[in-house]
Image (cartoon, helix red, strand yellow):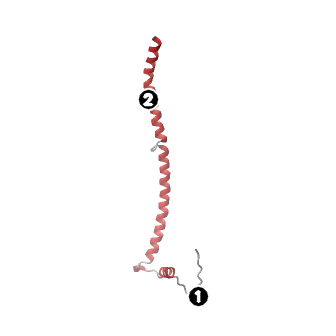
Amino acid sequence: MNLNYEIRKRLKAGMGPILGLLLVCYFSYHLIEGDRGLFAYLKLQQEISQEQAKLRLIEIEREKLEKRVNLLNPENLDLDMLEERAREVLGLAHPDELVIYTK
């Protein structure tokens, strides 16, 4: 009877710290490995930097296209650009020019 009482007493005394330790382990694991944990955060940061690099490339391409479009603006028309576009669209060339078709 005395041994049984001692075991129950120690179990009750140790239950709080054991549960606390288990809770700390649980939340620590999810802090690192969870859906919103440290590894997920680092992966998201990497994806953001990749997408920002793509965005910079697209913005550079857009600026190039805007410059070409501005050369065809009626207010400041560039005749060389107009001739280039007309030849490309109509498929025309001067008689003394050599045309090479590429895929």
Q: SS of the residue at dot 2?
A: helix
Specify the farthest residue to the top.
1
Quarter of the image for residue 13 reads: top left
Question: Residue 74, image x and y in percent?
Answer: 40, 80
Question: Residue 4, image x and y in percent?
Answer: 46, 14
* 94 or 81: nearer the viewer: 94
Which residue has dot 1 on it? 96
Mark 2 residue type: Gly
Mark 1 residue type: Asp
Q: Which mark is residue 30?
A: none
Packing grade of label 2 (10 A; few <14, some 14-19, many >=20) is: few
Q: Residue placed at 45% from the left, 18% from the top?
A: 10
In the rendered view of the protein, which quadrant contains the C terminus? bottom right
Question: Residue 35, image x and y in percent?
Answer: 46, 44
* 44 or 4: nearer the viewer: 4
Question: Residue 79, image x and y in percent?
Answer: 47, 82
